[in-house]
Amino acid sequence: MARGNHVENQTLGGDQLSPLMRRGRTIVTVLGCAMVPLIGCLEREAQGANGDGALENGMAYVPGGTFWMGAQNDPLSLPREHPAHPVSVGPFWMDAHEVTNAQFADFVQATGYVTVAEKPLDLEALMAGLPPESTVEDLDPTPGSMVFSPPAREVGLADVFAWWDWLHGADWRHPFGPESSLANLGDHPVVHVCYWDALAYAEWCGKRLPTEAEWEWAARGGLESKPFPWGDMAIDEGPVRCNTWSGRFPVENTLRDGHGGTAPTGQFPPNGYGLFDMAGNVWEICSDWYDPNHYETLDQTEPIVDPRGPDTWRDPSDPTEPKRVMRGGSFLCNESYCSSYRVTARMAHAQNTGMSHVGFRCAKGVQNSRAKH
Ligand SMILES: [Ca+2]
Ligand SMILES: [Ca+2]
């Protein structure tokens, strides 16, 4: 399989970064959090979709179908996107937009929910994931999150810590650090949320997180075997279609798409199902466990119906913290680095860790469909 200009290990950091990998620096993570009860969702009026799909309460209808999941002849693809295999998914609803700060604020106001990044670290649980020689004195329980901090000068792409900082006091309300706020960011996607936070929000709304298969099928928007939600045209050709990193990552951003960080949701045309920002802006957490070799274990002759991913997670690059799949890439994606705005790109999300470029959207089953959730 061709690799394009990728360096496989590069993607183990900037977009697959667990704070536990920072041993020797500040070691940070949180394990688990309480679920909030299902009490209902205060739906905000979503922007109308321009795609072909129906829109209901901010969700787009995604018809069921069968497709080849994973990369086929994409020179930008990585080994973990292979081999392509037939998958069949039932119809479902999917949020037309990434969940915004305003929507997440509604949830927090109604429930008093506290995100993982706002809680002191559970040092006992954290110790369980560290080597035996580690001591609790090595750990810092102060809450925080991973914040993108572009370096002032050229750096090698192998050292992700050149552009990621662990900041105490960074969380969804303070996305750039403790002194920052959500002023003018209400319509931007919520970030510094992890799998548990996304799950709690989804359950409160009577929804759920999409499976990885649903996410990819939805991102394709009705197109067959195309690398992007809009088809074949390369990211830097034609009109701007999504919020990514333009220029030399991570030191120079030409702002071709008009946004240096997250953009308000829905700034670019939706795909064929009326879904916005399926490429770029923020990564979107899925329900499946992450295993880079999972596709190799699957039947490639008969379609797998509504797959839910592997039974557990596996991440050789960081075996300390459980990982979920995230999809779609972010405002940090660039062709020189990860090209993860492609529909088959998949990355590990450390399920207890918030980051500047990770968010989510929800899905919901269709009554009487075979998708029983
Ligand atoms: Ca951008
Ligand atoms: Ca996105």
Image: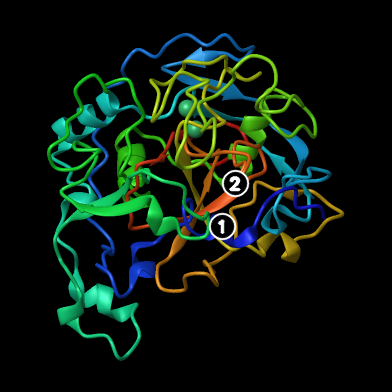
Residue furthest front as drawn: 153
Q: Earlier in the sequence, mark 1 or mark 2?
A: 1
Q: Label 2 near label 1: C-beta < 8 Å?
A: yes
Residue in the image at 62% along x and 31% along y: 218
* Kind of residue at disc 2: Cys
Name the mark on residue 43: none
Instruction: Identify the image quadrant of residue 241.
Output: top right
**85 displayed left or right of 97:** right
Numbered circle sitting on residue 338: 2
Which residue lies under the disc numbered 1?
A: 10
**Spatial separation of the CA atoms under disc 1 and disc 2:** 8 Å
Q: Secondary structure at mark 1?
A: helix
Quadrant holding the N terminus: bottom right
Tell me residue 133's x, y (percent). 30, 91
Q: Is 64 situated above or below 8?
A: above
Provide the secondary structure element on which disc 2 rests: loop
Picture layout, residue 310 above or below residue 243: below
Q: Nearer the viewer, residue 279 or 2?
A: 2
Whether residue 350 can be seen here? no
The percent coordinates of residue 200 (x first, y second) are 30, 44
Q: Nearer the viewer, residue 298 or 27?
A: 27
Q: Position of residue 15 (x, y in %)?
A: 48, 51
Picture quarter containing residue 45?
A: top left
Camera-side residue of 348 and 75: 75
